[in-house]
Amino acid sequence: MLRVCINRPEKRNALSRAVLEELGRVFEEHGSDTSLRAAVITGAGNKSFAAGGDLKEFASLRSEADAQALFRRANEALGEVRRFAVPVVAAVNGLALGGGAELALACDFRVAAAHAGIGFVQGRLNISTGFGGGTDLFELMGTRRALRLLTEARVLDAEEACHIGLFDVAATRDEALENCLERFLEPIRALAPQVLRAFKALASDHRIGLTRAAREHREQTEFVHTWVHPDHWAAADQLLARKS
């Protein structure tokens, strides 16, 4: 299990350029680890998952070239999360705002603390989404609901975020986030790493909009790989032995 923690609690885990670059580097570096079954991203403390981009640092970025470079670097970093070889879970330990909400959506799943919240609040600063998360939001929520979330620019609590599908599950009021996370990860841990990589590959191809023919080709490739793997035959032989 790869665990990544944004450790800037004094800055509400704001996403500076250094944080974004390190995030991309870590996910790129571990993408070839075939022993992994999942990855988890969280923030330090219990107040913020990530409070968005580091506004103090970004205040000097005023030109079009600066803005283009910021978007490109941030989107590349989140792209490593999106493309990671196995499922990535955002353990939302507090508020995920602006760019922090975009980071949460770059992950495959979102498990939230009871007090957590998420908000695409970029409009309050008179900007649009800047890390590629707008594309993720429209893909996940559909055109009408995504546009409403962007134009309302408000923070949703964990219950509402679960209700509309932004969060997959939230801890109960008397439950620690870590316990909720472990329950969510339990079925994932039960699958073989190569099977999880196959499922993630199918999801990634769909996410980037490959043609059906290309996705079916990927599905065939992954099926063949997992079919001939010894893990498949060990499971099949065990099942047949129980039935005989």
Image (tube, rainbow, N blue to C red):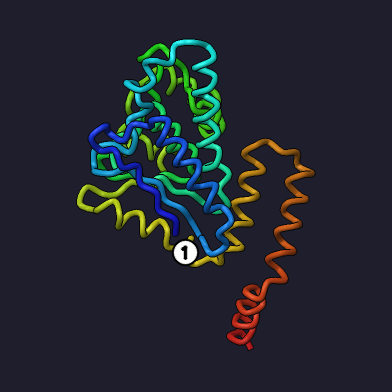
Q: Relative to 1, say whether 65 is above or below.
A: above
User: Is residue 135 among the parts visible in the rendering?
Assistant: yes
SS label for mark 1: helix
Residue pushed farthest left?
174
Residue 124: where, in percent of width, then height?
A: 35, 15
Residue nearer the viewer, 106 or 183: 106
Q: Residue furthest bottom?
A: 244
User: In which quadrant will I find the N terminus?
Assistant: bottom left
Residue 117, given in percent of the width and then of the height, sits at: 31, 34
Q: Nearer the viewer, residue 160 or 226?
A: 226
Q: Is residue 218 left or right of residue 178?
A: right
Question: Residue at left 25%, top 38%?
Answer: 9
Residue at the image point whose x is 52% and y is 29% from the top: 73
Taking the image as drawn, is residue 117 in sight? no
Q: Is residue 185 above or below residue 78?
A: below
Is the residue marked by circle 1 packed among few (<14), some (14-19), or many (20+) residues within 10 Å? some
Residue 42 placed where, x, y %?
35, 45
**Which one is nearer the viewer's eye here, 117 or 39?**
39
For the C terminus, give its image quadrant.
bottom right
Q: Position of residue 78 (x, y in %)?
A: 51, 36
Location of mark 1 (residue):
189
Q: Is residue 155 above or below residue 204?
A: above
As shown in the figure, which amino acid type bears the numbered disc 1?
Answer: Arg
Residue 231 in which image quadrant: bottom right
